[in-house]
Image (spheres, helix red, strand yellow):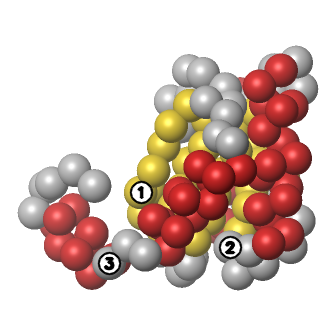
């Protein structure tokens, strides 16, 4: 599955569902964003069970501001509607693979208990 364009209209409904969603905040003028794009796209083809979304920070400035994006590219990972990873910077393919494995391997019941207890994920 190729990546999908996320906007203010479909962002919440996309991340709120079950499963894993990776979100790439980017802009056309951003060199590191352009370098990361093929890595992100290749992963989207390799992992069809994961939703890969891209948010153009120029077109979706309010959405980027609401997500506290201060540097691009920024990658966020959501699992079962919960933000479990957020980090600026382009990742090499190996690091993205590692991240995907970690997100997929999370014990979400433990994460939910930690959140309920007020702990950081």
Q: Quadrant of the N terminus?
A: bottom right
Q: Does the image show residue 62?
A: no
Sort mark 3 into few (<14), some (14-19) or many (20+) by Cα contacts within 10 Å: few
Q: Image quadrant of residue 91?
A: top right
Mark 1 vs mark 2, CA separation in Å: 14 Å
Residue 102 visible in this rendered orientation of the protein: yes
Going 56% across and 78% down the picture, which residue do you hit?
Answer: 19
Classify 10 Å Cα crowding around label 1: few (below 14), some (14-19), many (20 and above). Answer: some
Q: Nearer the viewer, residue 120 or 7?
A: 120
**Rendered location of residue 100, percent (x, y):** 57, 64
Q: Secondary structure at mark 1?
A: strand
Q: Residue at x 45, y 65 (%)?
A: 102
Residue 42 lies left or right of residue 89; in this view the side is right
Which of pointers 1 and 2 lies earlier in the amino acid sequence? 2
Residue wearing tag 1: 84
Q: Are marks 1 and 3 in contact (CB under 8 Å)?
A: no
Q: Give me the residue at 22% from left, 50% from top.
A: 120
Q: Secondary structure at mark 2?
A: loop
- The answer to whether mark 1 and mark 2 are in CB contact below 8 A is no
User: In the rendered image, which residue does mark 2 sit on?
Assistant: 50
- Residue 111 image-quadrant placement: bottom left
Q: Is residue 100 above or below residue 29?
A: below
- Residue under label 3: 107
Disc tally is 3
Q: Which quarter of the figure is the C terminus placed in?
A: bottom left
Q: Is residue 46 left or right of residue 92?
A: right
Residue 79, how many percent across, how many down? 48, 69
């Amino acid at each position: 599955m190729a990546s999908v364009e996320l906007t203010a209209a479909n962002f919440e409904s996309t991340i709120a569902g079950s499963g894993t969603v990776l979100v790439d905040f980017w802009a056309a003028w951003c060199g590191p964003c352009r370098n990361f794009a093929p890595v992100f796209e290749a992963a989207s083809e390799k992992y069809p069970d994961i939703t890969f979304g891209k948010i153009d920070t120029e077109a979706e400035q309010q959405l980027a501001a609401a997500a506290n994006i201060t540097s691009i590219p920024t990658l966020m990972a959501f699992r079962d509607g919960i933000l479990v990873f957020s980090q600026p910077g382009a990742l090499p393919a190996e690091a993205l693979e590692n991240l995907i494995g970690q997100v997929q391997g999370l014990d979400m019941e433990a994460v939910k208990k930690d959140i309920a207890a007020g702990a950081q994920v």
